[in-house]
Image (tube, rainbow, N blue to C red):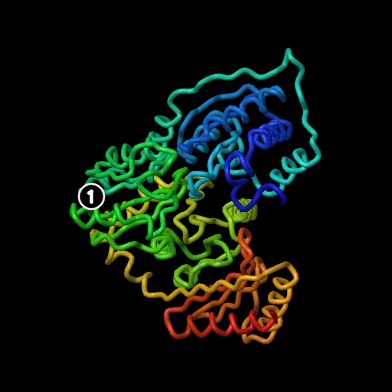
Amino acid sequence: MELFGSSGIRGVALRYLTPELVLDIAKAAGSVWDADRVAVARDTRTTGELFANAAASGLAAVGCDVDRLGVVPTPAVGSYCESAGVPAVLVTASHNPPEFNGIKLVGDDGVELSVDVLERVERRVLDDEYDLADWRAAGATTAVEGAVDDYVNQLLDAVDREAIADADLTVAVDPGHGAASVSSPRIYRELGCEVLTVNATPDGHFPGRDSEPVPGNLGSLSRLVATSDADVGIAHDGDADRAVFVDEEGGFVDGDTSFAAMADACLEPGDAVVSAVNVSQRLVDVCDANDAALELTPIGATNIITRTRELHEEGVNVPVAGEGNGGVFFPPYRLSRDGAYIGARFLELLADAGDPVGDVVAPYADYHFVRRNVEYDDDAERDDMLSAARAYVETADAEPNTTDGYRLDYGDAWVLVRPSGTEPKIRIYAESADADRAEQLATDMLVAVESGR
């Protein structure tokens, strides 16, 4: 697809992402959807209102009435769509810096659109083909109150409130000034936790930290946990569809580690887990231990959603899916990422174990991950290096997975080489419980790639 990537469309606001483009995307989506009403929502970014207005105008122009939800977390949009039976245009750039904004399209089941539907929307935009209404059929706009309240209540009903409350947990929450500021602290308080907050005022400039919940951005949360004797820290990205954790000493818990721990708690023999091709060895080992299948997709939430739907249609149970960036799906709840729900499931895990975070995640933490980047000057050089990688893979003592680049699984370790989708780089990843083995796998692939220059 030319416009939509692995999780919607994103770009620097008013440069790549313009009101005109948002208007066209909304007109195209409204033309493809068989819907009389469509919701429009946004996160806290400073350009959010501008783009939400453009989206509402585009939808009204093709005859759709518009429900304006205002600033709400992405999972609350999914909740509203599912309950009201309407699709949505969501203005968000998720974890990107404040100068970015973007668009996600959500179906009337509360789930991001599948690849085939996105392609239909994209084709309308590229062909400049819209089902424009005349002046008598233009859509009307209604401000909707209570979407966050309804979402919070649905989430609370979906988790073990009693077990979490009985655990008497102190939780430090860092919404990163994003959309979770209006929901997550409230959710964990209503779950019976004592809640401390940092960066919890909605502000699209993200003054306290950058939106992406990675270790370098979570110093304030780590200090809060360490100095307050909190049991756990929970951090979100800008639109609140991800959650990552800080342990009781203020140490960052790798997303692959928490994903593996939560998967281990809910898998049964015969189940399947869907994840991206850069999946951690931790999850591979958890699936093996539980006699569960592991299905790999190209990187990105849209691809994971599409494959999970296919497996459901085949009668395969998928209790958990996602990636190691904090974006975990629990399909029996909803086939969308929900940062607050991910956090609540992790609190259930802590409550059930009765142990501190460090002990709970310890069985999944002793792995070594290596990443290398190789820059290239032009497409020809990239293609030559990927050809060299392919030649190396074809001689390796492992069956390659070519879902997205080339991945070699050795049982106890893996290595992946793939071109970046956003930068002029070829990325190499390797992982093993043995640090030396992970380093050697990455180095061998790096030598092979660079031989193609």
Residue 98, given in percent of the width and then of the height, sits at 48, 44
In the rendered view, would you say 69 is above or below 398? Answer: above
Q: On the rendered structure, is 195 left or right of 319?
A: left
Q: What's the amino acid at mark 1?
A: Leu
Q: Residue at x 42, y 58 (%)?
A: 266
Circle 1 sits on which residue? 169
x, y percentage for residue 12?
Answer: 58, 45
Instruction: Report whether 349 appears left or right of 322.
Output: left
Figure quadrant of residue 421: bottom right
Residue at 61%, 71% in the rendered image: 375
426 relative to 128 in the view: left or right: left
**Which of the two residues, 204 or 421, is positioned nearer the viewer here?**
204
Task: Say if 202 sits above or below 323 in the image.
Answer: above
- Res 217 → quadrant: bottom left
The one nearer the camera, 309 or 64, is 64
Q: Quadrant of residue 26?
A: top right
**317 or 8: which is nearer to us?**
8
Name which residue lies at 62% across and 29% down: 54
* Left or right placement of residue 156 versus residue 418 in this view: left
Establish if 96 lies above or below 52.
below
Counting from the top left corner in percent of width and height, residue 328 is at: 47, 54
